[in-house]
Image: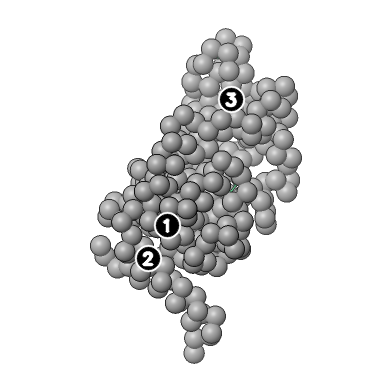
């Protein structure tokens, strides 16, 4: 016998699937919660990286002044993504795969992610805006040289370029601007969006957190997938799906059926 809450959840998923099916321009907006089921810790909430470390270590000025304090955190964050010390790199989960499938089927137009783990791209998403950059490369702050960011290149306590300059991973640090083009691309997508699915984001970091609000202002239906309410839930969300990303996307995909 299905419980009341299971029935309610089932109805929400059905309503969400209908909104997704009818969308002209569907956009996904993801945060760290998207990758928790791939074994990558979030920043806030249960098991969050900021429960262990002070976010100031990823402030750009602090990194330039004391890179030796920032690198242990960077290494710990990346060990999950890149794999090192014998640990395999993180893999896309069901939610990443369903979004890539919806894009390939022409259902999903754009994925805007705050994540730097590369898992949307690894799952096959192509119309992807990496709002906070990525962790594929590092750039020398002196000569601008770009190097791959891998376990080998990050073995030194403070990785430096051959010119002696400091190497900075190409993801956005606090106090650093959004990569040129990413902000415009995200705002352009939000303006065209008539349905946005927010996944696994607490909605507390700007300017990223303004993107779903832009979509809302232009009249988009906002669906949120998150086991916990976020900063968005009471303010802009039309349909809150209190579930983990993997299970929620599998259920919605099953309800949508083949395109
Ligand atoms: N499925 C879906 N959501 C989940 C899951 C899951 N399995 N597990 C946790 N969550 C939710 C949490 O409830 C929380 O609301 O994911 C969210 C993670 O929030 P944050 O860790 O704050 O991640 P995010 O919103 O992406 O942070 C934004 O902050 O530190 C900076 O640059 C960093 O891009 C990051 C930005
Ligand atoms: Zn250099």
Identify the residue at horizontal 73%, vertical 48% (top origin): 51
User: Sequence order check: which comes first, mark 2 or mark 1?
Assistant: 2
Location of mark 1 (residue): 220
Q: Nearer the viewer, mark 2 or mark 1?
A: 1
User: Sequence order check: which comes first, mark 3 or mark 1?
Assistant: 3
User: Sequence order check: which comes first, mark 3 or mark 2?
Assistant: 2
Q: Is mark 3 within 8 Å of ligand 2?
A: no
Residue 29 on image: x %, y %: 47, 50
Q: Which secondary structure, mark 2?
A: helix
Instruction: Please rate how many residues cluster around mark 3, counting C-alpha atoms within 10 Å: few if below 14, some from 14 to 19, many from 20.
Output: many
Location of mark 3 (residue): 168
Residue 38 on image: x %, y %: 52, 52
Location of mark 2 (residue): 19
- Label 3 vs label 2: CA separation? 41 Å
- Label 3 vs label 1: CA separation? 37 Å
Q: Nearer the viewer, mark 3 or mark 1?
A: 1
Residue 14 on image: x %, y %: 40, 73
Left or right: 253, with 171 as reference point: left
Instruction: Please rate how many residues cluster around mark 1, counting C-alpha atoms within 10 Å: few if below 14, some from 14 to 19, many from 20.
Output: many
- Label 2 vs label 1: CA separation? 10 Å
Q: Which secondary structure, mark 3?
A: strand
Work out which residue is located at the far bottom of the displayed protein and give it.
1
Name the quadrant containing residue 219. bottom left
Left or right: 95, with 105 as reference point: right
The answer to which of 70 and 172 lies nearer the viewer is 172
Label 1 near label 2: C-beta < 8 Å? no
Scheme by which the image is coloured = one colour
The answer to which of 221 and 49 lies nearer the viewer is 221
Label 1 near label 3: C-beta < 8 Å? no
Left or right: 167, with 11 as reference point: right
Identify the residue at horizontal 55%, vertical 67% (top origin): 242
């Amino acid at each position: 016998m299905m419980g009341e809450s299971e029935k309610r959840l089932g109805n929400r998923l059905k309503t969400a699937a209908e909104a997704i099916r009818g969308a002209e321009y569907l956009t996904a907006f993801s945060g760290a919660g998207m990758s928790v089921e791939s074994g990558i810790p979030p920043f806030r909430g249960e098991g969050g990286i900021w429960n262990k470390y002070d976010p100031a270590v990823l402030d750009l000025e602090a990194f330039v002044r004391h890179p030796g304090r920032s690198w242990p955190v960077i290494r710990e964050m990346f060990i999950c993504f890149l794999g090192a010390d014998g640990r395999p790199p993180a893999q896309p989960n069901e939610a990443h795969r369903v979004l890539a499938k919806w894009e390939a089927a022409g259902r999903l137009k754009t994925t805007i992610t705050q994540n730097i783990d590369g898992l949307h791209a690894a799952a096959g998403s192509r119309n992807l805006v990496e709002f906070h950059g990525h962790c594929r490369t590092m750039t020398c702050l002196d000569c601008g040289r770009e190097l791959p960011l891998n376990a080998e290149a990050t073995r030194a306590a403070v990785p430096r370029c051959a010119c002696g300059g400091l190497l900075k991973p190409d993801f956005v640090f606090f106090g650093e601007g959004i990569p040129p083009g990413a902000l415009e691309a995200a705002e352009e997508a939000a303006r065209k969006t008539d349905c946005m699915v927010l996944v696994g984001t607490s909605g507390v970091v700007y300017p990223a957190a303004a993107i779903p609000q832009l979509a809302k202002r232009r009249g988009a239906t906002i669906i949120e997938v998150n086991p916990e309410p976020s900063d968005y839930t009471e303010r802009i969300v039309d349909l809150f799906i209190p579930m983990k990303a993997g299970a929620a996307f599998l259920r919605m995909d099953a309800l949508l059926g083949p395109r």
